[in-house]
Image (tube, rainbow, N blue to C red):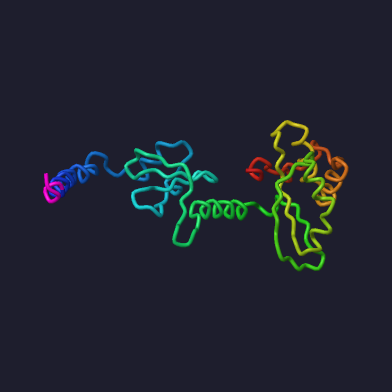
Amino acid sequence: MGAVSRIGLLASVLLAGIPAWCSADDQYPVVSKEELASRYAGLTVDAIHESPIAGLYELDFGNNIRYVSTDGRFMIRGDIVELTNHTNVTEARRAKNRADLFASIDPANEIVFSPKDGNVKYRVIVFTYVDCGYCRQFHRGIAEVNALGIEVRYVSYPRTGPNSESWTKAERVWCAADRRTGLSRALSAGRQSDVARGDLPRARRLDHRRASR
């Protein structure tokens, strides 16, 4: 068989396959965002976006981003990088999610240590619990940190959960009349505020679960 004949045969095979490729959409139609959301617990329609790659949905599970083919058959776990500018578009989505989470924190649930001169150059959010050794070490230098123009915002995160000693300590600190002093005492020496849980007005109890999400 000559070269021309072989090329002609190859072209015929490729052309014959095109109808099968085109019919794939009929065999596996595009799944709507509503249908896709119903397949995954906790996923809402608003958390499904068009991805940078045609034929893929971007599923936003918070810090976990997944990509699913628009026919719902395949899932890709991994990051997408735009090679023209070397931008990690998946990480950009995660960064936005983190920024939205921080913005949703109620300032009333924060204990804030700001620079004395009021010149705030940076803000840091620290999710803490009073038994955290690293947090205690960090807080010992809070004055030096503030002097650099860094504002520190502490958010309660008693990782052992409700009905635990750590939770009780956090509740007493966050519900104290002077929360800054209460937190400093708790982190410096592990001492709790003298405020007792039973004496706290109901309206001043904090929703620690919501603040720590």
Camera-side residue of 207 and 56 = 56
The quadrant in which the C terminus is found is top right
Q: Is residue 3 magenta?
A: yes
Q: Residue at 27% across / 40% down in the picture?
A: 28
| Image-quadrant location for residue 71 | top left
Percent coordinates x, y for residue 35 in the rendering: 35, 40
> Is 122 left, or right, of 27 in this rendering?
right
Extreme-front residue of the structure: 2
| Image-quadrant location for residue 189 | top right
Q: In the rendered view, would you say 83 is above or below 157? A: below
Percent coordinates x, y for residue 182 in the rendering: 84, 47
Percent coordinates x, y for residue 138 in the rendering: 80, 50
Q: Residue at 78% across / 44% down in the picture?
A: 134
> Is 58 left, or right, of 118 in this rendering?
left
The quadrant in which the N terminus is found is top left
Q: Residue at 21% across / 46% down in the picture?
A: 22
| Image-quadrant location for residue 75 | top left
Camera-side residue of 7 and 147 = 7
Extreme-top residue of the structure: 163
Provide the residue span drawn in magenta. Answer: 1-6
Percent coordinates x, y for residue 128 in the rendering: 73, 45
Q: How many marks?
A: 0
Camera-side residue of 81 and 89 = 81
The secondary structure that dominates the magenta segment is: helix
